Amino acid sequence: MEGFDPAINYGPNDAGISAITIILGIFVLIFISWLFGKIYGQLAKIFENKNKSDI
């Protein structure tokens, strides 16, 4: 009996990952990065305005 070689027996899409899944995953990562940037920007503005009013 021969050994099992996954590189021969399985292709890249056999794990249930399709091109649309990869593309959607990339878009989700970009969106999450953008969202964190927006939240950080809003918090920075709030703290900057708070510091100006304290002076």
Image (cartoon, rainbow, N blue to C red):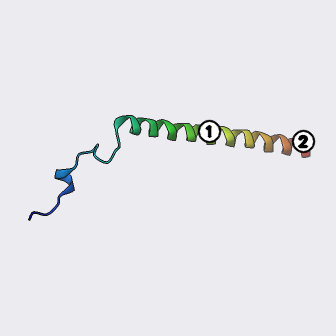
Give the residue at mark 1.
35
| 37 is higher (above) or lower (below) than 2 | above
Q: Secondary structure at mark 2?
A: helix
Instruction: For residue 55, say whether it is visible.
Output: no
Measured as percent of width and height from the top left, residue 4 is found at 17, 60
Residue located 79% across and 41% down the image:
46
**Residue 15 image offset from top left, x and y in percent:** 31, 48
Q: Is residue 37 visible?
A: yes
For badge 2, the amino acid type reads Ser
**Residue 44's disc number:** none
Left or right placement of residue 1 versus residue 16 in this view: left
- The single residue placed furthest to the front in the displayed view is 1
Q: Marks 1 and 2: in contact by CB < 8 Å?
A: no
The mark found on residue 53 in the picture is 2
Nearer the viewer's eye, disc 2 or disc 1? 1
Q: Measuring from the top left, give residue 25's x and y in whole percent.
A: 45, 40
The location of residue 34, given as percent across then percent down, is: 59, 37
Quadrant of the image occupied by residue 33: top right
Q: Residue at x 51, y 38 (%)?
A: 28
Secondary structure found at label 1: helix
Which quarter of the figure is the C terminus placed in? top right
Tell which circle, 2 or 1, labels the residue nearer the N-terminal end.
1
* Alpha-carbon span between mark 2 and mark 1: 27 Å
**Three-letter code, disc 1:** Leu
Q: Residue furthest left?
A: 1
23 with respect to 51 (left or right): left
Closest to the observer: 31 or 10? Answer: 10
Instruction: Give left or right: position of 48 versus 34.
Output: right
The foreground one among 34 and 2 is 2
